[in-house]
Image: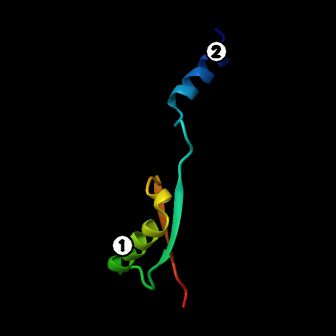
Amino acid sequence: MTLKNRLSKLEASISPSRPYKVVTIQCCRDDEDDGDRNAARDRHFAAHPEDRDANLVVFIRKLF
């Protein structure tokens, strides 16, 4: 087995079987309102239950 084949096999065994799932949620007028952030996350997951298995949740601040 060549080095290239061994590295490919090692990389395949380490890599996740599925890509990371990133969800973006709009919320929060200011950075310190965690209650607004939690409420926005709950509303989003209620509307989109398929996003509950996300690896990363990104909160985007609303601009008013």
From this viewpoint, which residue is outermost toward the left?
35
Residue 37 found in image quarter: bottom left
Colour scheme used in the picture?
rainbow
| Percent position of residue 41, x then y | 41, 70
| Percent position of residue 33, x then y | 35, 81
Q: Residue at x 65, y 17 (%)?
A: 5
| Percent position of residue 7, x then y | 60, 21
- Quarter containing the C terminus: bottom right
| Up/down of 56 relative to 25, above or below | above
Task: Say which label, 2 or 1, has the lower sequence index.
Answer: 2
From this viewpoint, which residue is outermost toward the top?
1
Tell me the amino acid under the disc marked 2: Leu
Label 2 neighbourhood size at 10 Å, few (<14), some (14-19), many (20+)?
A: few
Q: Residue at x 62, y 23 (%)?
A: 8
Q: Nearest the camera: 31 or 59?
A: 59
Q: Residue at x 37, y 76 (%)?
A: 39
Q: Which mark is residue 27?
A: none
Residue 32 found in image quarter: bottom left
Tell me the amino acid under the disc marked 1: Asn
Q: Nearest the camera: 1 or 45?
A: 45
- Which residue bears the numbered disc 2? 3
SS at mark 2? helix
| Up/down of 45 relative to 36, above or below | above
Q: Which mark is residue 38?
A: 1
- Quarter containing the N terminus: top right
SS at mark 1? helix
Label 1 neighbourhood size at 10 Å, few (<14), some (14-19), many (20+)?
A: few
From this viewpoint, which residue is outermost toward the bottom?
64
| Up/down of 19 relative to 46, above or below | above
How far is mark 2 from mark 1, CA to CA?
49 Å
